[in-house]
Amino acid sequence: MSSPIAFDHIHLISRDARAAVDWYREMFGGEIVAEQPNLRGAPQVDVRIGGVTLVIRGQRPGEEPAATKPMQHFDGYSSHDEWGTDHFGFTYRGDLRAFCAELKKKGVRMAVEPWEFKPGLVLCYVAAPDGVSIEMIQAKE
C-alpha cells in the first residue's frame, strides 16, 4: 500500500531569484519546470534537480527576511547551529571530490570540503546562494 504522503518541494527565498535559479541550473543541471514572474508580488521559479523541486522566489512586499548564520564547524560535524532546517542534501553518483573540484572551478565555495565522515562515506557542504547549505553525499558503489 502506498503512503498518502509524498515529498513535494523545498521552498527557498532569495535576494535575487533569477540569479539563484541560474546558479542551480549551472551547478547542478537544474531544469526550470514552472515560472511565475509575479506571484504575490515576487518572481517564483520551480527548478527540478535529481527528482526534487526547488521553489525559488524573491522577497514579497512586507517581508524582511533575516540572513541565516553561516555553517559552523564542530568536533566531527558541521551545522548552522540554529533551529529549523539546517540543510538539504543530494546524493552524487561518482567521484564527489572530482565533482567538487569542478564546482570550485565554476566559482562555487565549499562550506565544508569533502571528507570521510565515516568509513566509505565521503560528504561535503556546498555554500549555495542566500546562505543555503547543500550536503553532497557520495553514493556507495
Image (cartoon, rainbow, N blue to C red):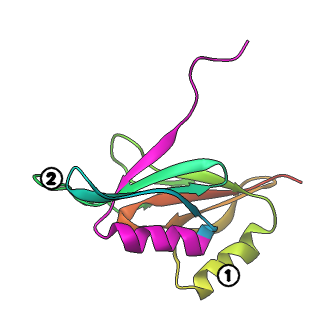
Q: Was residue 50 drawn as part of the magenta stretch in this picture?
A: no
Residue 94 horizontal side relative to residue 12, left or right: right
User: Number of callouts in the render?
Assistant: 2
Residue under label 1 = 102
Question: Is label 2 in a helix, a strand or a loop?
Answer: loop
| Residue beneath the point at 57% across and 75% down | 26
Mark 1: which secondary structure?
A: helix
Relative to residue 36, is residue 8 depicted above or below?
Answer: above
Estimate the x, y position of residue 19 in percent, counting from the top left: 40, 74
The front one of 90 and 84 is: 90
Residue type, numbered disc 2: Glu
* Nearer the observer, 124 or 91: 91
Disc 1, disc 2: CB below 8 Å? no
Q: Amino acid at mark 1?
A: Glu
Picture coordinates of residue 125 (x, y %)? 55, 63
| Quadrant (top left, top right, bottom left, bottom right) of the C terminus | bottom right
Q: Is residue 111 visible?
A: no
Q: Is residue 4 left or right of residue 116?
A: left
Say which of marks 1 and 2 sits in front.
Answer: 2
Magenta-drawn segment: 1-27
- The answer to whether residue 62 shows anywhere in this view is yes
The reply, left or right, for residue 26 in relation to residue 97 is left
| Residue found 53% across the figure and 37% down from its top | 8
Label 1, label 2: how far apart the Cα atoms are:
36 Å
Seen at 64% across and 68% down, the residue is 29
Name the residue that disc number 2 marks.
63
Spot occupied by residue 120 in the image (x, y as percentages of width and height): 81, 54
Looking at the image, residue 7 lies above or below residue 130? above
Image location of residue 65, percent across then percent down: 20, 56
